[in-house]
Amino acid sequence: MDLAGKKCVPCEGGAAALSGATLARYRENIDPAWKLSDDETYIRRVFTFADFAGAMACANQIAGIAEYEGHHPDMAVSWGKVAVTLSTHAIGGLSENDFILAAKIDHL
């Protein structure tokens, strides 16, 4: 599954969040550094850097990808660290879009 080659599509409420074997299959296609929440509603990854400038540069790269994809993560930037959380709020869980964006972020 080439998630990085896909494009995020608008997601409307009413769709089912990924779960079970389908969720596991998507997780196999992203870096294992992405951690699944206990309630399976989001994935999160923390990137570390030597300084604040490195963290900001990463955050700006992620912002550019997210804007292009129309799928926007929650990000927290601090000295030497960027925490990225992906979830599809419209469905209260994870969708293919979250994994597409994760795969694109993995290629940075």
Image (cartoon, helix red, strand yellow):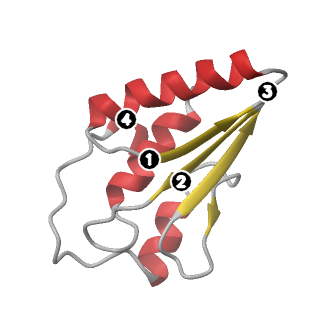
Q: Residue under circle 4?
A: 66
Please tell me whether mark 1 sits on a helix, a strand or a loop: loop
List x then y, in percent, for residue 104: 46, 36
Q: Amino acid at mark 4?
A: Ala
Q: Badges 3 and 1: C-beta atoms under 8 Å apart?
A: no
List x then y, in percent, for residue 23: 46, 72
Residue pictured at 70% horizontal, 52% vertical: 33
Q: Residue under circle 2?
A: 85
**Distance from the alpha carbon under mark 3 to that under mark 1:** 19 Å
Task: Tell me if residue 6 comes above or below residue 1 in the rendering.
Answer: above
Q: Residue under circle 3?
A: 49
Q: Badges 2 and 1: C-beta atoms under 8 Å apart?
A: yes
Q: Amino acid at mark 3?
A: Phe
Task: Tell me if residue 78 comes above or below residue 38 in the rendering.
Answer: above
Please tell me whether mark 3 sits on a helix, a strand or a loop: loop
Q: Amino acid at mark 1?
A: Pro
